[in-house]
Image (cartoon, rainbow, N blue to C red):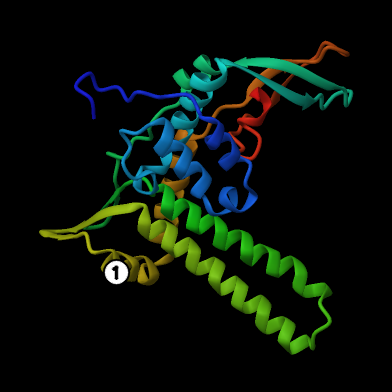
Amino acid sequence: MPENGELPVYPMTAMDEITYRTADALFNGSAVVNVIRSCVPNIVDPWHMPSADVDAILVGIRIATYGHELELETKCPHCEEENNFGVDLRVVMEQIRMPEYQESVVAGDIEVFFQPLSYKQQNENAIKQFEDQKILQAVPDADLPEQEKMDLINSALLKLSDMTVTAITGSISMIRAEQEIVTDPAHIKEFVQNCDRSIFGALRDKILQLKEQSTLKPITAQCSSCAQSYETPFTLDVSNFFGSGS
């Protein structure tokens, strides 16, 4: 970290833009990692950066490369009219907040502390979830015996459940039980797998709350046709976030 506490952000190169248009690299996360490594060289290993920081970094790279204005296309929910309007990314940057990871969950004599997932953990979970959801969508129409279909569906559902446990485990930094402190991921996962429903629910709800704190807020737009205002989600879709400026 530089002495002034701010990371320098450089514009994307032509090679960075080519990388960002490679479908496989986008899917497995390497495009994001390579572009961050190129544009923010102080981040030595982007795979291990907190996932909660990724949005802020991508917004910074977008501003450095194309400027602070981003044009969005949305559809009015009232009249179905397509609308184009500009978003000031400097305002978006100011709204990004790091969740309050200092807040713990207490259940009896157990206190659980949290941490952000790394970008690598988040990306791996997203890929596995995508693959299992594709299986669940494809199996009902597949030309397979019913028992084989049920086996595939049950296997996919078990994997999705395990992903939930893995995501919760990765989001826990420490468990304190009386005078004992547990930080070993294997022991934390064992605790998550074997805790009762109320504790599991409290952990899940807290992690969802932390995720909500870092989620980008919707943007208010006004329809050019019917003049009514409406909110539209603002997400950093890595497949097109940089394309509009080129």
Residue 15, placed above or below residue 127: above
Q: Residues within 10 Å of mark 1 (few under 14, many from 20)?
A: few
Query: Could you tell me how many numbered marks the image carries?
Result: 1
Q: Position of residue 201 (x, y in %)?
A: 45, 57
- Who is closer to the viewer here, 11 or 233? 11
Q: Position of residue 30 (x, y in %)?
A: 49, 49
Residue 74 falls left or right of residue 130: right
Residue 13, placed above or below residue 44: above
Q: What residue is shown at x 39% (from left), y 70% (from top)?
A: 193
Quadrant assignment for the N terminus: top left
- Who is closer to the viewer here, 89 or 171? 89
Q: What residue is shown at x 62% (from left), y 29% (from top)?
A: 234
Quadrant assignment for the C terminus: top right
Q: Position of residue 120 (x, y in %)?
A: 42, 52
Mark 1 belongs to which amino acid? Answer: Ala
Residue 177 falls left or right of residue 59: left
- Who is closer to the viewer here, 119 or 209? 119
Q: Position of residue 164 (x, y in %)?
A: 48, 61
- State the residue lying farthest toward the left: 179
- Element under disc 1: helix
Q: What residue is shown at x 38% (from left), y 35% (from top)?
A: 99
**Quarter where residue 147 is shown:** bottom right
- State the residue lying farthest toward the front: 14
The residue singled out by tag 1 in the image is 186
Q: What residue is shown at x 82% (from left), y 27% (from top)?
A: 77
